[in-house]
Each structure stands twice: as C-alpha cells, then as structure tokens.
Image (cartoon, helix red, strand yellow):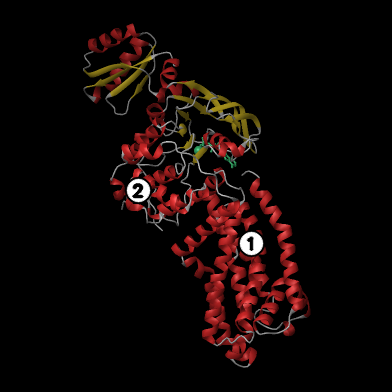
C-alpha cells in the first residue's frame, strides 16, 4: 500500500523567506506523525501545501498516492484540515457550523443535522450547540474545529498546533480525541511546538527548524541519537546547589544544567559507569541527595543538541494557560 | 470569567470512537448546492448579527432625515416635495455603501482561516465567492426594504407604484452586484477588515456625493457638472428616480446596465483569478 504521505525535496519561499527549504519525508498509514519545531520553522507552510492550499515552489508531495498539485481534487476528497486558527464561523452556532460543512460535503439537510448532533455529543459540545461560536472558550473552539474535520471521516487529518494556547484540561481532552482518531484508523499529521506533546502522541516525529528537517524517527530514536544519558539529581537543600554543581563538573567533566527548581540538577553523561564517581564525589563533599535518577534525555535536550538553540516555549506545562476567551 | 464550564462534561471515549469511524463518503455537493448553502450561511449571519444591516444603512438613513427636514424646504419648497426627489437617490447611496461588506466579509473569512477550510474541501472552488455574493444580494434587498419603509413613513409616494419601486430597486441591485467584485479584490489584497472599510470610503464618498443624489447639478460649477454627468451613480439615481415615479428613463437605464456589465467584465475575472491563485 502507498504511504499516507510522501514528500520529496519540497520547498516554498515567501519573498526572501525560505519557509520550507527542501524537506523529504515519508509517513506510514495509520500512524500519528508529529512535526515538531519552534515558531516560524515552516510547519504551517508544509501542512498548507499538503492540504493543497499552497503550491510548492519545488519538489513534490503525494498524499494517499495523489500528487498535491496535479491531483489536488483527489487529495481534497480524502483529507481534512484543522488549521492553526480555528476555522469556524464565529457568528454561527456550533450546530450551524457543522451543518454547513455537512451540506458542502453533500449530506442532505436531514443527514447533516443528524451528523452534527452526533459530533457535538461526542465532542462534549451538546450544551453549546445553539450558542454562537464567539462565546466559546478556546478549548471548545478547538474541539468544534476538529469535529468539523470529521463531518465525513477523512483518511488523513492535518492538525496544525492543536493545543497551542489551551489550558491543561482542554489540552488533555484534545489529546484524548487525537488518540481516538488514530485508533479508528485515520492517519494524523500533527504539528506542535511542544516537545511533550510530540512525545506523548506521535508514533514517529520529525524535527524541523528553519524550513529544514533536522531529525526523524521515534522519540526514542531521537533521544538515543543524542548519544548519552542524563543524570538527574534532587538536592535536599538549595544552599548546596553551587557546591554540588562544582563537584559534578569536576567529577564528570561535563556541563551541569539546573532543573525546574533550584534543588534539581541534571548532567549529560557519556558513560553510565561514571555515575558512581559522581555520587561518591557529592557524598565526600557532604552534600545530601534526596533523589537521583538516570534517564534518557528529555526532548528539550534533544532539540538543543540538534539545533544548538532551545525550542521556545520550553514545555507546554510552563506556558501560561491562556484559553482564548472572547470578549466583544 | 470562564465560559468553559459547559465543557465540564468530558469527551466520552465510547461516543468518540463511534463518530470517528469511517463511513461511506457522500457525493460532494454540486456547485449550485454549495453556492446556495454558503448563501444560507450569509442569511444566518444576518439573523445572528442584525446590527450589520444598520451599521451601513444608518448613515444614509440619517442623511435622509437631515436633508429632508433641514434642507428640504430650501431645496424643493417643502420637505415632502424634497423626499420624492431624494429617496431613490438615498437608496442608491445606502446600497452602494453596503457593498463594502462583501469585501469586509471575505477578508474576515480569510484572516480567520475559514477560507482555508472551504478551500480544503472537495467543493467547486469558487463556491465561497458566489455564495457570498448570493448572501449579499439578500442583504442588499433587506437594506433596500429598510430605506424604502423609512421613506414611506416620511411621506415618499412613488408614482410608479409597486412595480416601479421593484424595478428601480432591482436596477440598484444589479449595479451593486457589479461593484461587489471590486470589494472582493480589495478584500483579498488588504490585511484587515478595517482597512477594507477605510480604503472603500475613500472611493465611495466622492462617488456618491459627486452625483445628483442630493441636489440637481444645474447649480454646480461647470467642471463639477462634467464630473457628475460621467458618474455612473448619477445615472443610477436618475434611472431609479424615474422608474419609481413612472417616468421614461430608458437612456439612464441603458447607461447603468452597460456600466455594470463593463465593471463586472473587468473585475470579476481578476477577482476569480486572484482567488484561484494561492495566498
Ligand atoms: N503568507 C506568508 N507570507 C510571508 N511570509 C510567510 C507567510 N507564511 C509564512 N511565512 C514565513 O515563513 C516562515 C515559516 O512560517 P510557518 O510555516 O507559519 O511556520 P510555523 O508554522 O512553523 O510557525 C516564517 O518565517 C513566516 O514568517
Ligand atoms: Mg504555524
């Protein structure tokens, strides 16, 4: 069977900006594929080309075996796009938005209404069905937007930054929805700036930066490609932090990073056997450790190792929970 | 203040799986059905946001009241006399102004990402444009009804009767329809809905004021009379006035129809070409 998506040397510029600068990628059917990259990396441009909204400058792409330029109609008949900004009509109600899409896709008025009601129920929007979308919270908009992509179930769903700007609760709901979509057999190509999201949802992922693909694989592959493990240490008191840092640097000859709070430290180590040396050094210096763990690097560290700069925003849980509340 | 309390009912996995499973795909709506559906959307918008009708008609309605009572006596002997002259012209002005909403609406849909959804559907691609135009005709019709009703209240008594008023209104709609194509182009070119408004008013104020809507151009300086006589709005106002009062104005009607055809022939292909071109 042909893959869900095959991209060859795809490129797109806007004036002097090379938004997508030669990407090759193959995505298997039935998977959740994550396109991970910071703001401006070229994620949206890639997705809009695949959804036939933009014409590539160079290279080719096939979606479910159809060329995105020459067979754009065939592609449109099989995919759905949930764009970065909720693509629903603010003036209309939730129900009306779904009926509108249903009618455009060829359902009768009656079938379109039945389908809309079903979708609203499943996406926890029944009570908001007759309210104008402008009164919806960010999470509700997102869910309605995804529901609109499933008025007729697509074979491939493009999901552009589905959780950006959502509070943690809404984000978890969207994650549940994405998992259910994949379980029912729709291939999902999702983009995200959040490493945690890619790690949790995607079977495989590609890291893109400045329009180029810089790494591809499972999140496990990517982590091991950094070629090292990470020692995480939780100190008992904050006061020990600088001394502990000094000891670890000396014992391991590596750069030590501070964690989320001032009590935690992490250091990348090439050889697991040296963990003992590190712990012995801390003990000899009289520094008490509350906890330590040896783990794979986080995706943040992977991103840093690959690009030489951190992914911004650092992680989804650190970003302020700003549901797009409307006030007109 | 969170409005998300309603979503406290979480998504239910059972129901989700049921709605997400693959079902046979219906045959996609025909171009006509898609256009009608998108026209229905425009009706829903009027239902939910009726203010959008007042927004643009408010100004012409105010002009009607002001001109009729302040200047009516001076310009035509009496307010009642003057409104017979003014009202068809005010109708022209109101409808010409409201055409801007075609561009505003289109631009809003593009900036909000709604056009990305429409364009990614397997529908006849220009359906969103024609659907919007269909909705606009309804909108213009409603605005016309408002203006004429106010006129009747103020003493407007068209001698051409109902057929005359309907024909006059229809002619105004034909011209408005051709003008809409220009706003579709502006709507695709500028960045925000507000700039569609500002751009358009730079054009619409001179277009409607340098005409015979408010006064007979006979008292104007010669150069201005020339400008006025070439302004299609002048011919439209003359034709609408004549039709509504049962006078013979074939020349003006022909002028308007030809002008509308030329405007459409020039701008519709450009608009569609731009629409097909990627953004
Ligand atoms: N329509 C456009 N016109 C000009 N520049 C654009 C346009 N769309 C995107 N860009 C530029 O292309 C680059 C990639 O953008 P985008 O694909 O939106 O990135 P991402 O979705 O990863 O944040 C950015 O530098 C952006 O400013
Ligand atoms: Mg983007």
Left-right relation of A283 to B187: left
Q: Residues within 10 Å of mark 1 (few under 14, many from 20)?
A: many
Q: Nearer the viewer, mark 2 or mark 1?
A: 2
Residue A54 lies, in percent from the top left, at: 60, 39
**Which quarter of the picture shows residue A66?**
top right
Observer-nearest residue: A59 or A42?
Answer: A59
The image quadrant of residue B241 is bottom right
Q: Give me the residue at 66% from left, 85% from top.
A: B245
Please identify the residue farthest to the bottom as the structure is shown: B77
Category of crowding for the residue at label 2, using alpha-carbon neighbours closer than 10 angstroms: few (below 14), some (14–19), many (at least 20) = many
Q: Under tag 2, what secondary structure?
A: loop
Q: Is residue B13 above or below residue A290?
A: below
- If the image is split into quadrants, where does the C terminus of chain B sit? top right
Q: Residue furthest top?
A: A273
With respect to residue B201, does B5 lie above or below?
Answer: above
In depth, the one of A226 and A139 nearer the eye is A139
The answer to whether A61 is drawn above or below residue A88 in the figure is above
- Residue under numbered circle 2: A125
Give me the C-alpha separation between circle 2 and circle 1: 37 Å
Q: Which residue is mark 1?
A: B180
Name the disc covering residue B237, or none: none
> The residue tagged with tag 1: helix, strand or loop?
helix
Q: Is residue B277 visible?
A: yes
Residue A155 place in picture, x, y as percent? 49, 34
Q: Residue at x 26, y 13 (%)?
A: A282
Query: Residue placed at 34% from the left, 9% from the top?
Result: A272
Task: Let me know if residue A89 appears in the view.
Answer: no
């Amino acid at each position: 069977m042909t893959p869900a998506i095959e991209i060859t040397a795809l490129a797109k510029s806007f004036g002097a900006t090379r938004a997508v600068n030669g990407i090759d990628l193959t995505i298997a059917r039935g998977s959740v594929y994550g396109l991970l990259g910071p703001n401006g990396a070229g994620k949206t441009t890639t997705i809009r080309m695949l959804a036939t909204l933009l014409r590539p400058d160079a290279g080719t792409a096939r979606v479910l075996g159809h060329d995105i330029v020459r067979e754009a109609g065939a592609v449109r008949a099989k995919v759905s796009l949930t764009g970065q900004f909720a693509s629903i009509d603010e003036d209309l109600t939730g129900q009306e938005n779904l009926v509108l899409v249903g009618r455009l896709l060829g359902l009768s008025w009656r079938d379109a209404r039945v389908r809309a009601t079903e979708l609203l129920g499943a996406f926890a929007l029944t009570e908001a069905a007759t309210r104008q979308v402008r009164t919806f919270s960010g999470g509700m908009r997102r869910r309605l937007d995804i529901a609109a992509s499933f008025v007729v179930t697509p074979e491939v769903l493009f999901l552009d930054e589905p959780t950006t700007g959502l509070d943690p609760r809404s984000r978890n709901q969207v994650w549940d929805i994405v998992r259910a979509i994949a379980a029912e057999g729709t291939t999902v190509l999702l983009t995200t700036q959040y490493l945690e999201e890619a790690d949790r949802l995607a079977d495989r992922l590609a890291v893109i930066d400045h329009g180029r693909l810089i790494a591809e694989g499972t999140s496990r592959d990517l982590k091991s490609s950094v070629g090292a493990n990470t020692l995480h240490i939780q100190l008992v008191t904050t006061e020990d932090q600088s001394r502990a840092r000094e000891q670890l640097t000396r014992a391991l000859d590596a750069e030590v990073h501070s964690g989320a709070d001032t009590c935690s430290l992490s250091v990348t180590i090439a050889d697991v056997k040296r963990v003992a040396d590190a712990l012995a050094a801390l003990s000899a210096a009289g520094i008490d450790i509350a906890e330590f763990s040896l783990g794979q690097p986080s995706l943040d560290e992977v991103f840093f190792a690959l690009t030489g700069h951190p992914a911004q925003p650092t992680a989804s849980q650190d970003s302020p929970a700003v549901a797009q509340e409307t006030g007109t | 203040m969170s409005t998300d309390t309603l979503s406290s009912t979480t998504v239910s996995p059972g129901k989700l799986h049921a709605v997400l499973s693959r079902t046979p795909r219906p045959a996609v709506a025909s171009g006509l059905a898609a256009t009608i559906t998108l026209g229905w959307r425009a009706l829903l918008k009027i239902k939910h946001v009726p203010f959008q009708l007042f927004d643009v008609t408010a100004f012409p309605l105010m002009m009607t009241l002001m001109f009729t009572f302040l200047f009516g006596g001076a310009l035509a002997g009496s307010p009642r006399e003057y409104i017979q002259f003014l009202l068809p012209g005010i109708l022209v002005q109101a409808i010409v102004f409201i055409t801007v909403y075609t561009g505003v609406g289109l631009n809003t849909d593009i900036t909000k990402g709604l056009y990305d959804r429409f364009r990614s559907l397997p529908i006849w691609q220009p359906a969103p444009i024609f659907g919007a135009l269909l909705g606009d005709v309804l909108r213009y019709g409603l605005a016309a009804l408002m203006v004429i009703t106010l006129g009747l209240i103020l003493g407007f008594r068209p001698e051409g009767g109902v057929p005359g008023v309907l024909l006059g209104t229809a002619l105004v709609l034909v011209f408005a329809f051709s003008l809409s194509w220009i706003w579709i182009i502006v709507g695709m070119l500028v960045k925000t809905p507000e700039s569609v408004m500002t751009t358009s008013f730079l054009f619409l104020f001179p277009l409607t004021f340098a005409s015979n809507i408010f006064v007979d151009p006979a008292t104007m300086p010669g150069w201005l009379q020339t400008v006025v006589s070439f302004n299609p709005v002048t011919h439209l106002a003359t034709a609408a006035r004549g039709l509504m009062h049962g006078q013979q104005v074939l020349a003006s009607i022909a002028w308007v129809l030809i002008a509308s055809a030329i405007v459409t022939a020039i701008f519709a292909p450009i608009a569609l070409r731009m629409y097909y071109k990627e953004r």
